[in-house]
Image (cartoon, coloured by chain):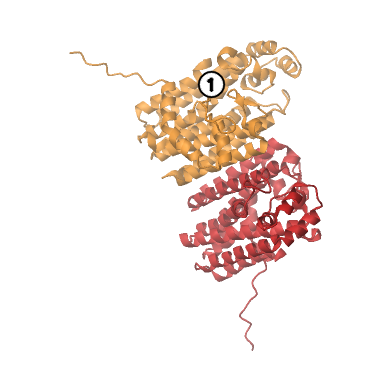
Chain colours: A orange, B red
């Protein structure tokens, strides 16, 4: 008789996301069900569970990366998946709150091919629904066994999230050149706050509820933050050079919207960037600008920076004792989030 | 030699408010100072500390009832005033967050004779500044010694606050008569959520940080909730029959805005209310409507209901052991909040 091969393929990221989504869904649904019915409908609409008016539907929700990180954080700490459920619910609520409010601030009218909540229900109701989700996230952790300790982590992440969003809003009004221009390191700090803080908090909160020691919690927080920055950098590359058929976004969309993304800001720091700055201030065809940004090294530098943050995720994960299976699943999530452009 | 009289007059409510405001101010200022500078300016503007642009100024802030309740809650539990400071800071931050967001939802353009934050800085920035204050309140309690236990109380109050605001927004769209009309008991529940929950939480949180036993915490929470309902009812009476020179509000303002307040809703429940409902649906002079509401017993019933809640405050306070001095100061705050119309 031949022995079976001892190496079992690790689950793919979509499998990991599906498993965690199915595990967390009942608790998330029950928690949202405790909201005021009107606010609960807006929340359900944004999760893709219903149409305006409340008719049930299956619309695309988010990928559920944050809930997966929370579940894997608990498992990586040696706890059963269910230990991370309260953390998973809390971070999905926070994520949805931030989408609702960000869409108001950014004036975005569609998300996942549907009207945004403020567009469908009005600005005031969308503000209130966001507040309700925020409050519910705090309550979920405050009443979870062992969750009180996680509230410090969550409140730090919330503060960073708001700080990052403030910077992002202010960047839009700053010039492309001169002493007031946005520097790449300011952009990186913004991306860590706006995207990394909640990813880090997700994994760390799961670990806290799973009873992990402080060093493990801190390492998972760090890993998630680097993952968030890497994801944002890759997203920036795709926002300029991505294939619209794959990304679902318009070609050169970020350039048309004059977004201050990392490739542009790095290119502007290169010698001879004056011409690029002039073009950015004018109405020139984005394809021309994209070419100049690439020539100035903006694309290469952004991908190199993304690789540095991906390596930092690995360093953080390798520095503490973690259960091998869940740690590998964390790695496949990271790969899934960033492989698109590398 | 004659002995000095042993009875010293209790401080008046303005003295209590001043003492607590001075005690809490340095911590509140330091906490707000940790915000992103742009968000911190919006917060300082709404506290009355600066003008748009950041120039320091002394503009009227709020009365500071919530911070005073938190300090008195700690003192009533036998702790020093300083034990309640973190609670006081947290509830003032939550109160300001809710004002910022409510002004957006209600479209109010002025508050305390200045432009509201959304009017002065824009809707998006005001949403974000509110979020930042909310996050800061959670962080303040999460990092305060003994504050973790208070986060459950705070999150319940936040949930009730949002629920009350949702009901208030929905009441506006409901009819004056028929099965869909707003019933007085629905209004009372809305007022408890929107006004009472945070007042109750303020006193209770102070007590929690002051080390009070659960029965004392619950009694102070109850007392604050009834105080909030009584305050709202008195405010409703003043909104229809108050002297504009005293209230600073336009005469019959609530009737002109067609607000569904307790006096109107009670009057509509009286026999023969059909005529009143017809008037409310038409463009008749508010003075006529005010007369009819009074004739139908709306004013008397509202004041009687307010007195019931004032009595309930006393019942709550008398049912647990409290330090006599702070308990009397709590009573003078209540008197101050409701004496205007009784």
- Which of the pair B18/B63 is nearer the observer? B63
- Which of the pair A331/B281 is nearer the observer? B281
Q: Is residue B321 above or below residue A93?
A: below
Q: Quadrant of residue B308?
A: bottom right
Tell me which residue sits at (74%, 13%) in the image.
Answer: A284
Residue B187 % position (x, y): 62, 52
Residue A143 % position (x, y): 46, 46
| Mark 1 neighbour class, 10 Å CA radius: few under 14, some 14 to 19, many 20 or more | many
- Does any portion of residue B81 appear in the rendered image? no
Tell me which residue sits at (49%, 28%) in the image.
Answer: A64
- Which of the pair B335/B17 is nearer the observer? B335
- Which of the pair A53/A201 is nearer the observer? A53
Which residue is the site of mark 1? Answer: A306
Q: Is residue A276 above or below residue B301?
A: above
Residue B62 % position (x, y): 70, 54
Quarter of the image with the N terminus of chain B in it: bottom right
- Does any portion of residue B157 appear in the rendered image? yes
Residue farthest toward the left in the current orientation of the protein: A1
Tell me which residue sits at (70%, 57%) in the image.
Answer: B272
> Is A57 on the left or on the right of A328, as rendered?
right
Q: What's the chain of the residue with tag 1? A: A
Q: Is residue B16 above or below residue B156?
A: below
* Total numbered labels: 1
Residue A305 % position (x, y): 55, 21
Q: Secondary structure at mark 1?
A: helix
Quarter of the image with the C terminus of chain B in it: bottom right
> Is A25 on the left or on the right of B101, as rendered?
left
């Amino acid at each position: 008789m031949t022995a079976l091969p001892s190496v079992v393929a690790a689950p793919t990221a979509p499998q990991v996301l599906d498993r965690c989504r199915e595990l967390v869904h009942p608790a998330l649904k029950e928690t949202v069900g405790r909201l005021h019915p009107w606010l609960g409908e807006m929340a359900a609409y944004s999760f893709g569970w219903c149409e305006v008016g409340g008719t049930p539907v299956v619309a695309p929700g988010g990928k559920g990366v944050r809930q997966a990180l929370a579940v894997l954080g608990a498992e990586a700490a040696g706890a059963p998946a269910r230990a991370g459920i309260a953390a998973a619910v809390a971070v999905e609520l926070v994520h949805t709150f931030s989408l609702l409010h960000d869409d108001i601030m950014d004036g975005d009218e569609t998300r996942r091919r549907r009207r945004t909540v403020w567009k469908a229900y009005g600005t005031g109701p969308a503000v209130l629904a966001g507040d309700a989700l925020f409050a519910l996230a705090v309550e979920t952790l405050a009443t979870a066994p062992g969750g009180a300790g996680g509230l410090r982590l969550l409140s730090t992440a919330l503060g960073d999230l708001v700080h990052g969003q403030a910077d992002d809003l202010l960047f839009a009004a700053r010039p492309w050149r001169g002493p007031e221009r946005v520097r790449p390191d300011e952009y990186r700090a913004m991306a860590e706050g706006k995207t990394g803080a909640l990813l880090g908090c997700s994994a760390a909160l799961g670990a806290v509820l799973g009873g992990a020691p402080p060093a493990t919690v801190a390492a998972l927080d760090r890993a998630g933050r680097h993952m968030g920055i890497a994801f944002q950098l890759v997203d920036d590359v795709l926002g300029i050079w991505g294939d619209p058929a794959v990304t679902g976004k318009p070609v050169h969309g970020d350039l048309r919207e004059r977004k201050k993304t990392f490739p542009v800001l790095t290119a502007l720091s290169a010698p001879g960037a004056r011409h690029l700055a002039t073009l950015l201030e004018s109405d020139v065809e984005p394809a021309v600008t994209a070419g100049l940004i690439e020539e100035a090294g903006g694309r290469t530098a952004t991908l190199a920076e993304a690789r540095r943050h991906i390596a930092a995720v690995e360093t953080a994960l390798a520095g503490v004792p973690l259960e091998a299976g869940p740690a590998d699943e964390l790695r496949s999530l990271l790969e899934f989030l960033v492989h698109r452009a590398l």
